[in-house]
Amino acid sequence: MKRWVWAVVAVVVAVLIGGYAYSNHRITENQYNTEMSNGQAAIQAKQYTSAESHFENALKRKTNDSAAQRYLDQTQSFVSGKNAMTSRHFNAAKNYFTTVKNTKNTSGVLVTRSKSRLATLKIVIKNVKKYNKIYSEAVTQNKATEYEASNATLNQLFADSEFTKTYYKNIYTKARALQTANTKGITGEATSATTSSSSSSSSASSSSASLTSSEQSAANAYSGSNEYTVPKSQTQIDGQTITAAQINNARSTLSSIGVTPGQFSDQDIRSGLIAANKAGISFKSYAQKNYK
């Protein structure tokens, strides 16, 4: 075969290979752009799980693409912030939303939403500190059998319309239980707890270690859904029930880093232990980041 024939064949092959490569590149590029566009649309619609999936698919089209990775990280941080806020881990939520706000060249929608939540958290964290201080004063008065004074202190909480919001549910539940105990103390019905086996559950028993005797009496009589009647999954780590010893050790850890452990119920401590385990870090590291 003459040389010019081989040359023609080589040119044709090169064109075919180049055309295929270009076509494949365009298809991949279009798929990537579609996934990125769909991810941003899902964020706009507040469909965050869907948004994460789209950004993950974009990364499959372009491995190690920095833009897709930034969008994915930002979306995941925002979702983590929402979950932390729902679980009333407000300092953790603040950290997540701050990360979202400071992420450059990504979703402006998530930045705006994070700024809004940070503004809310600023108020919530300030109120939690104030409400815990008032509640602690009421507990001290209850222990001194100053029941009327304790109820008067609690009335400062109940007079605040903000206090009924779900952010403060843990404190609200404990305050109502203490109010009931104070009222019984005033009327002489009860000044100490009488454990009722019919109204106690295993989760309630393990959660009551941080309550006064009169608080426990009210807690046992409470029939609603609160921190003393949490799902089993919120009392276990890897299928093993969190023990009183683990809770006490966690309280000691809080004291060692300068955090007053008395402001947290046993269930608050359990939630922190579970969160630390999920994050793959020690409770001390978790507490230093989220409780201080």
Image (cartoon, helix red, strand yellow):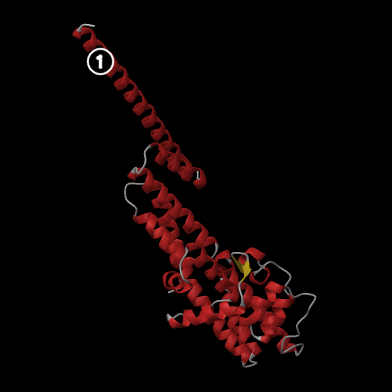
Q: Total marks drawn?
A: 1
Residue at the spot 23% in from the left edge and 7% down from the top edge: 5
Q: Nearer the viewer, residue 179 or 204?
A: 204
Label 1, secondary structure: give it: helix
Residue at the spot 48% in from the left edge and 75% down from the top edge: 129
Q: Position of residue 8 (x, y in %)?
A: 24, 10
Residue 243, located in which quarter of the rendered image? Answer: bottom right
Q: Nearer the viewer, residue 264 or 149?
A: 264
**Image position of 140 with respect to 118: above or below:** below
Residue at the spot 38% in from the left edge and 31% down from the top edge: 28
Q: Locate the N terminus by quadrant.
A: top left
Q: Position of residue 105 (x, y in %)?
A: 32, 47
Residue at the spot 63% in from the left edge and 73% down from the top edge: 173
At label 1, which amino acid type do we have?
Ala
Q: Residue furthest left?
A: 3
75 sits left or right of 273 in the view = left
Q: Residue furthest top?
A: 2
**Image position of 289 with respect to 98: above or below:** below
Q: Position of residue 2 (x, y in %)?
A: 21, 6
Q: Residue furthest bottom?
A: 144
27 sits left or right of 252 in the view = left
Q: Position of residue 246 (x, y in %)?
A: 56, 77
The residue singled out by tag 1 in the image is 10
Q: Work out whether residue 110 can be spotted.
A: no
Q: Residue furthest front?
A: 1
